């Protein structure tokens, strides 16, 4: 909090070198605590509270470190301190190196794992999969996409397996659902699993 003023207005800094310096300094101090954690900082509205999101980049081994750090965050009128990447609406695109994926063009198909009944597995269907299937950033980009749609914690704890394939011409005919329905599907699936255990 002694050094928060430059970060309050970091989105308004036009000097990219100065912005990078501030972000690098923040990361350096965060890594003194745990070098497996990362952060997002900023806010959509200049007059609203700014956010610091601490993330373990989906690594379950370091989730407790995120929770411990956020539990120690000070109370502030200017900042919200948030544990894990929260879920977002699908009105965005994911850019990863030279690859851009629009969530509105992605569907998902629920899958069953015969070796682990009740686990959540999905197949992502991309309209342009055949054009980008050899791109080395495809899988990381899709993971970032699901991370944003579900939130980091739900993705890491509840999704067991993801496949990526070409989206059929008529997705609904093959059981594919729009990606914005994935959060409600995961919530429903978890409820079903709990109900089944109760019935047993």
Image: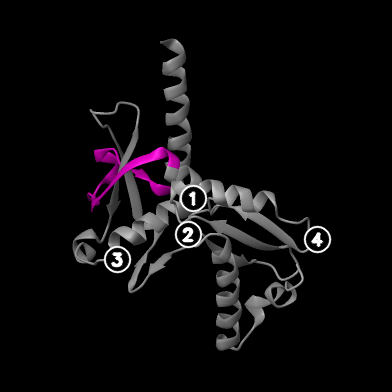
Q: Quadrant of residue 192?
A: top left
Residue in the image at 77% along x and 71% along y = 2
Image position, residue 87 (x, y; %): 53, 50
Task: Report the residue at 27% width, 32% height from top.
Answer: 112
Which residue: 44% across, 64% down?
93
- Mark 1 sits on what residue? 62
Provide the residue designation for mark 2: 36
Q: Quadrant of the C terminus?
A: top left
> Front-most of 15 and 69?
69
* Crowd class of label 1 (few under 14; some 14 to 19; many from 20; radius 10 Å): some
Image marks 4 and 3: residues in contact by CB distance under 8 Å: no
Percent position of residue 161, x then y = 30, 42
Q: Does the residue at mark 2 contact the one at mark 1 (Cβ under 8 Å)?
A: yes
Q: Which residue is mark 4?
A: 77
The local crowd at label 2, few if under 14, some if 14 to 19, many if 20 or more residues have their Cα within 10 Å, is some
Task: Work out how far the residue at label 3 is from the one at label 1, CA to CA, in angstroms.
Answer: 24 Å
Q: Position of residue 71 (x, y in %)?
A: 68, 48
Q: Depth-wise, is mark 4 or mark 1 nearer the camera? A: 1
Highlighted magenta segment, given as a residue range: 157-179
Q: Residues within 10 Å of mark 4 (few under 14, many from 20)?
A: few
Relative horizontal placement of residue 104, taking residue 42 as reference (left or right): left
Q: Which residue is mark 3?
A: 137
57 relative to 108, above or below: below
Looking at the image, is 83 positioned above or below residue 177? below
**Residue lying furthest front:** 32
CA distance separating discs 4 and 3: 39 Å
Asked which quadrant contains residue 42, the reply is bottom right
Q: Secondary structure at mark 4?
A: loop
Sequence order check, earlier mark of 2 and 4? 2
Find numbered disc 3 in the image and state the secondary structure of the residue it sits on.
loop
């Amino acid at each position: 909090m002694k050094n928060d003023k430059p970060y309050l207005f970091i989105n308004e800094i036009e000097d990219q070198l100065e912005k990078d310096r501030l972000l690098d300094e923040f990361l350096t101090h965060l890594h003194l605590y745990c070098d497996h954690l990362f952060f997002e900082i900023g806010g959509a509205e200049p007059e609203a509270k700014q956010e610091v999101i601490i993330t373990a980049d989906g690594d379950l081994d370091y989730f407790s470190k995120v929770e411990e750090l956020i539990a120690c965050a000070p109370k502030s009128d200017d900042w919200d301190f948030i544990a894990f990447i929260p879920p977002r609406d699908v009105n965005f695109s994911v850019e990863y190196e030279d690859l851009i994926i629009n969530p509105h063009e992605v569907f998902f198909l629920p899958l069953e794992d015969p070796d682990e009944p009740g686990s959540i597995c999905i197949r992502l269907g991309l309209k342009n999969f055949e054009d980008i299937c050899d791109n080395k950033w495809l899988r990381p980009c899709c993971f970032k996409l699901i991370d944003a749609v579900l939130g980091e914690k739900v993705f890491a704890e509840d999704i067991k397996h993801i496949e990526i394939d070409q989206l059929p011409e008529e997705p609904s005919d093959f059981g594919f659902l729009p990606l914005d329905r994935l959060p409600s599907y995961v919530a429903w699936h978890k409820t079903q699993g709990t109900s089944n255990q109760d019935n047993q």
